[in-house]
Image (spheres, coloured by chain):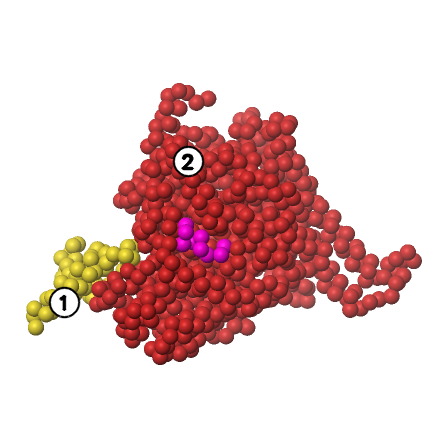
Chain colours: A yellow, B red
Amino acid sequence: MKCQHCGYEGLKGTFRYLYSTTPDAPIAYRECPKCFGWVQIDELEEEERERKKVTAQK
Amino acid sequence: MVTKEEEKEMQGFLDKKQYWWWADKARTTRLSKLRSAVWFKGARGSAYIPGVKIDPCGCKIYTDVFQSKDPVEPGAWTRAKADAAVLDRIPIFVIDDARIVGYCGAAPNVIFWIPYFAHAINEDLYNDRSGLFEEKDREWIKKDLDWWRPRTYQAACERILTRKEKMESALAIITLGQAHLNGFETAVFDHEWAFKGYGHIINAIDAKVKEARDRLQGIGELGPNTFPMNAPEDLPLIEKLDNLQAMKWTMEASVRWIKRYSRLAKILAENFETNPERKIELMRIHETCAKIATEPPEHIWESIQHHHFLDILKRYECSETAWPSRPDFYHWPFYKKDVIDEKNIARDDVIDYIGEWQLRTFETNRPWSRLYREIMTGGSGPLVWTIGGVDPETGEDACSDLTDDILTAARLTRTSEPTYGFRWHSKARPQTLRQVFECIRHGLGYPSIRHDEILIQNMMTNYGYSVEEARTWVHAACMSPACTTKETAQPIRYGNPTIVSSPAMSFAIFDGWDPVTKMQAGHHTGDVTTFDTWEKFYNAWIKQLQYIYWTLMRGLEKDRWIRMKQYPRVWISAMYERCVDAGLSCDEVKEHGNPWMTTSCHMDQFDGLVAVKKLIYDEKKYTWAQLRAMLLANWEGYERERMDFIRVPKWGNDDSYCDDIIVKAHKDINLQTQKPQTEWCGNSPLYLPENVSVYVVCSTKIGAQPNGRRWGDTLYDGGCSPGAGLDKKGPTAVLRSVGKLDHVRDFKATLLNQRLNPTQLAGEKGVQLFMGYMRAWHDLGIDHVQFNMVDNETLRAAQKEPEKYPELMVRVAGYSAHFVELSRKCQDTIMARTVQEI
């Protein structure tokens, strides 16, 4: 995933989980490890994207 | 006089829902001036606002008295002497334009503090990075704190705690503090006694002293030794005489302190004030204070001043978390006499007095640790004033013009404290209910609404009160009803160890191990992967709850014992007629109380229970090993699976599968964790789920849960509220779910947050919709509900440009706060709550 503040790219797990205010939806805030900015992501979408990427690499 | 243009402008503010601008125009110049001069002592985020300091006077005076004490004098004497020295030596002041005087502290921007209670708080304040003490004072304060460290109440209590108990208290795994760590209490006045005046109490003490002395000397018709000694009964009188002496000193000091205000007002009037109208006001303050220093009040301005002094004096002795009172009922006889019968004062002027009293209340606070400042972020109490309800003797509606005036004043002052709890009952007069609604519509977040009939039944059923006693109830703190009669008024905050209960779910899943602190925190209840039936898991969860509740109850009661024997509260003891009668401290005399255990972060675990039953035991879609792995990973990499757990039926949707499990669990908690316990006065507690901002603070203290919550996410915000956004079927479904709980028998009370749509509830139609909704709520026998009525558009705008919205208020959970003073996370969770269309 990509930080919209500084452009840092990395796996979702490298962005520290902060919190979600919508427990019934996969939207959450994570913290960029480089600039510490808050990034809002769709956890499910991002997870699927990463899974597909890993499968493609294999 | 309001001109037509001004009237039009004010209506415009109401139409645009800019209620703060309306209030700004509608309130008097005096109230506006007083309001702008107030120092708010609540926290913004977790920090006091710049300029607020901790008052070092109490530390200096207490240390002087305790270091020079006679080593053989009774503990109550030293405490009384220290309190009296504070009242004699603390600087006092009168604010410009004020007609109500009295503050707990030497200046308007300071928070009074004594180092006597918790060294944890002492050091927290001393080391606070925002500099709560003046640089010039830090050296001597440090010396004093070093002296106090082994002598604090906390130190005495910790001598009898195990290492594990101390860690549990300090780390806030299953509790947010204990009495010895918080250093605060909540004493409910014996109302009739307190309003008899200090002179009456001093005379009563003198009479008891004479009675005890005569008995010790055997004085009768023949003089000394008229009758023989009965040592087992007579000798305890020696200790009682010591206690009564101490009580008398504190009462006499109170009289002197009030007379200081009388004198100061006179000096200002005669020597400094040039405005003739203000001179008259100052002389009125002088006369009022001179009179009520010893006599009971006779007029409404005297009764308000007396009531205010009572609560300020209480705060000099001990940090108080609340302001339990029922102002419309207590002051009604004075109001009736002065406003209605004798017309000694105009109604508008009384509204002004009440508004000023609200401001004087708003400016108080206590010294908090940073943790507690965060728990009460944006608030300074909660200082809940109880209004409405019924007359204790007749059971008839107690709402009055004074109730309406209090609610009017609240809309004008728009302070987050005091906050109000309205005792809603079937006989309440419509015009007062309308005023209640108007406060909510103005976005104050209060009054919270309490079901009077249900709560009276609750107290009669669980604690054996007579109906007359139960009808006197006031809010002891945010939520808990407490009676105010001679035998029932409670001197302590039973719910002091605020319990964090959802960790019980983690403990049950991990055999007592806490995944956040990586400690064995709860009971060993067995390897969950071997639990082949739902009942085995359920019983393990109940056992973990027993561990949590019983640990905390033990701590609370030990704290009371230490206070009773070594750290007496003398002033408040004199405020209980039963204590003066017995010559004993309020911690020793057993009140007919109604103990409760405040329980935070409560509801998440119930939705977790439902998810476990459905997905592991009923449908067998997941195994315990899988769920444990997902929870330990904080659901990272398991988002699809997490959504499965989210989609399980949730509380607040009138779903019988879910609700049946949760209703049964509430009953079992009461029967298996609360009923087996007995506290000092012989009662069993009831648990009381609510939250203040604990649901935000604990978001990083409680691990991932089977309801789909991740570590870091806030918990459910109420005591019985559904999770934010999880109530999908409308407000009636929420009420139906919550109404299935037994609000009379299963708990002391429980908090329900609701958000209403301000557009839908505009105009007269809105009033009718609201009243219809409240009828449904009342018919379902739900003990509490409170509302936010601010739209997300406004809240988002306030997040973006906070400087433009300093007056925007919201209901957090048990208290109201200015939105811009809350942490971002807390703001987000309020916006995430479902806006209900009714």
- Residue B672, given in percent of the width and then of the height, sits at 50, 68
- Residue B474, given in percent of the width and then of the height, sits at 56, 48
Secondary structure of residue under mark 2? helix
- Tell me how many marks there are: 2
- Residue B467, given in percent of the width and then of the height, sits at 62, 50
Q: Which residues are magenta?
A: B735-743
Query: Given the image, on which type of amino acid does mark 2 rest?
Result: Gln
Give the number of the disc on residue B768: 2
Q: Which residue sits furthest top?
A: B4
**Position of the C terminus of chain B by quadrant:** top left
How many other residues sit within 10 Å of disc 2, few (<14), some (14-19) or many (≥20)?
Answer: few
Residue at 86% across, 59% down: B219
Would residue B44 appear left or right of B265 to someone viewing this image?
A: left
Would residue B246 appear left or right of B429 to someone viewing this image?
A: right
Q: Is residue B157 above or below residue B444?
A: below
Q: Are marks 2 and 1 on the same chain?
A: no
Give the number of the disc on residue B235: none
- Disc 1 sits on a residue from what chain? A
Give the number of the disc on residue A51: 1
**Residue B538 placement: quadrant:** bottom left
Using the rendered image of the protein, determine whether residue B319 is visible from the camera's viewpoint. Answer: no
**Residue B623 placement: quadrant:** bottom left
Query: Given the image, on which type of amino acid does mark 1 rest?
Result: Arg
Using the rendered image of the protein, determine whether residue B277 is visible from the camera's viewpoint. Answer: yes
Work out whether residue B70 or residue B178 is closer to the camera in this orientation and state it: B178
- Disc 2 sits on a residue from what chain? B
Would residue B454 appear left or right of B203 to someone viewing this image?
A: left
Distance from Cα at disc 2 to Cα at disc 1 = 54 Å
Residue at 38% across, 44% down: B788
- Residue B534, given in percent of the width and then of the height, sits at 38, 72
Q: Which residue sits furthest right?
A: B222
